[in-house]
Amino acid sequence: FERAFAFSILPNLRLDNKSPLFQHQTNHLLTRHILSAHTSTITNDEKSIFVVGSVNADIVVSIPRLPVGGETLLGSGGQVLPGGKGANQAVAAGRLASRFPGLNVKFCGVFGSDVHAPMLRHTMTGANVDLKSSFDSPGPTGQAMILLQPGGENSIVLVPGANHDWPTDWKASVLPEVEKAKYVMLQREIPDEINIAVARHAKAHDIPVLLDLGGDDTSPPDSLMSSVDICAPNETELQRLMNMPTTTKAEITSAVQALLKRVPKVLLTLGTEGSLLYNGTNEPIAQPRFMVKNAVDTTGAGDCFRGAFATAVASGELKTQECLRLAAAASAHCVSVLGAMPSMPTSAQVDTVLARSA
């Protein structure tokens, strides 16, 4: 090993490999190389949010109401906008990371090879999201058909596309990035096997994982939940997951307490009722919503909230209540703009919402 190392770092050194000078130079440089590698590992102070998840082209159609079976409704719009739960959360974090010096955002997902992929990449890199960990698929990009009703309520039909076409050797490049992260974010629009491997690796390195339950109606496997630090459902997802009613405050509390048997913390979003963070021991921390005069589109509100919350937590600069407040302000701006990813606010836009409520 020493001879091979010496020849690789001293290609122009013409010495007999048995000479004292050769041995001295080799041992000296080998020691420096090992110490340098060790030092770079233990002094890595990079602060990054690592988002592993989906990226979609959202096709947004406005309708007066949901159609019934066999009915044809006249809609409008038909805009193609960037989206996907993972990508949305990465962009939400990327646009707010400037509030916290030294914090950066990385995204790992699979882009298709169609006309949508360049638009998605351009939007995400423009929001300061690092895409070097992502992959390309020869197939189509994931798509979401979003049926938008008056008042901003929506129904979504998801077509996974490239989100389910991960390369077989993905772990070799992705898991080392997990180790560098301050915070890991997952959602359920990609295969469970990807989420499980990432979550387990993060837990093994004491890195907190936030799991957004959106994207798959089936119950997440225990092998995933056992590595999650915060589970983040909305009210409907909580009801479906626990198979318990969530209409009243008492019912919500019972459902959350049941979920806390599987995860340490629950971050519950309740739409117009704000959000609640449960840690399993104390009373939940409540965060009311910020009032919005004209809600246009609620599609990305949950993604925005979770991305902003993770950014605030990963910064290490804010108390939990402040993290929730920042997330609520971000999602308040989000619902006032059409489209999921385009509605993710900048730091200045969040400050505007906060100033209005001061």
Image (spheres, rainbow, N blue to C red):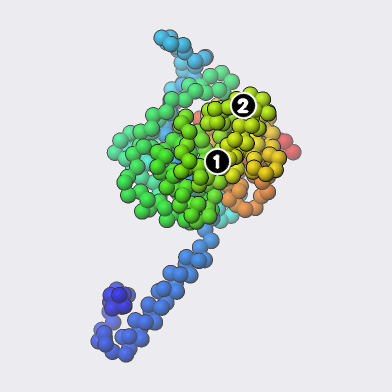
Whole-number angstrom distance, CA of label 1 to CA of label 2: 18 Å
For the question of whether residue 180 can be seen, the reply is: yes
Residue drawn where x is 59% and y is 35% of the image: 258
- Looking at the picture, does residue 77 appear above or below residue 69? below
For the question of whether residue 268 can be seen, the reply is: no
- Looking at the picture, does residue 168 appear above or below residue 9? above
Q: How busy is the neighbourhood of tag 1: few (under 14 within 10 Å), some, or many (20 plus)?
A: some
Residue drawn where x is 43% and y is 11% of the image: 69
Q: Which amino acid, by three-letter code, is at mark 1?
A: Arg
The quadrant in which residue 23 appears is bottom left
Q: Which residue is mark 2?
A: 246
Q: Which amino acid, by three-letter code, is at mark 2?
A: Thr
| SS under mark 1 | loop
Quarter of the rendering occupied by the C terminus: top right
Residue 112's spot in the image, x, y percent? 34, 37
Q: Which residue is mark 1?
A: 262
User: Is label 1 or label 2 in front?
Assistant: 1
Name the residue at the top extreme.
71
Residue 44's spot in the image, x, y percent? 51, 63
The quadrant in which residue 308 appears is top right
- Looking at the picture, does residue 251 appear above or below residue 136? above
Say whether residue 183 is left or right of residue 164: right
Q: Are the residues tagged 1 and 2 within 8 Å (C-beta)?
A: no
Residue 240's spot in the image, x, y percent? 53, 28
